Image (tube, rainbow, N blue to C red):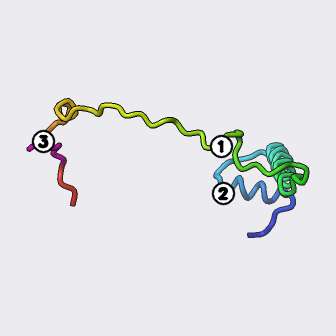
Amino acid sequence: MESIKTVSKERTERLAWLSKIALTPEEVEKFTEQLNRILEFARALDSPEVEAADPTFHVLNLTNAFRDDLEEAGLERERALSTAPKVKDGFIVAPKIV
């Protein structure tokens, strides 16, 4: 794909045609200017100055922030199966997927 340095009025009209949008000549002028400002902003993002910044591997200054493992009682089988629509031999019955 070609690199676009600036957007011409013809390109704006082509984009409008592809988008099936009817634009007046004033709107073509306005949108051409706006698209060029957007491209100018995007070009500024191509070369940010990051030499003075230290590399960041994580946004927070945390190292190995884990919670303690605590043993807790699980859900009782009868209670878990009580909400299932269909149960057979202590298991939930699901439709066959082929």
**Who's the residue at 37% across and 34% down the image?**
71
Q: Is residue 55 magenta?
A: no
Label 3 element class: loop
Residue 90 is labelled as 3
Q: CA–CA distance between discs 3 and 1?
A: 44 Å
Q: Which residue is label 2 attached to?
A: 18
Q: Looking at the image, tell me whether mark 3 or mark 1 is earlier in sequence order.
A: 1
Q: Nearer the viewer, residue 69 or 18?
A: 69
Q: Position of residue 27 (x, y in %)?
A: 80, 43
Q: Are marks 2 and 1 in contact (CB under 8 Å)?
A: no
Q: Position of residue 37 (x, y in %)?
A: 86, 47
> Residue 18 vs residue 79: left or right?
right
- Rendered location of residue 28, percent (x, y): 80, 48
Residue at 81 percent of width and 66 percent of height: 3
Query: In the depicted view, which residue is nearer to us: 43 or 52?
Result: 52
Q: Which residue is mark 1?
A: 63
Q: Nearer the viewer, mark 2 or mark 1?
A: 1
Residue density around tag 3, few if under 14, some if 14–19, many if 20 or more, within 10 Å: few
Q: Dot 2, how many residues are within 10 Å of its Cα: few (below 14), some (14-19), or many (20+)?
A: few
Q: Which residues are magenta?
A: 88-94
**Quadrant position of the C terminus in the picture:** bottom left
**Up/down of 78 relative to 37, above or below:** above
Residues at marks 2 and 1, CA–CA distance in whole angstroms: 52 Å
Which quadrant of the rendered structure holds the N terminus? Answer: bottom right
SS at mark 1 in the image: loop
Evaluate if marks 3 and 1 touch, with contact meaning CB atoms under 8 Å apart.
Answer: no
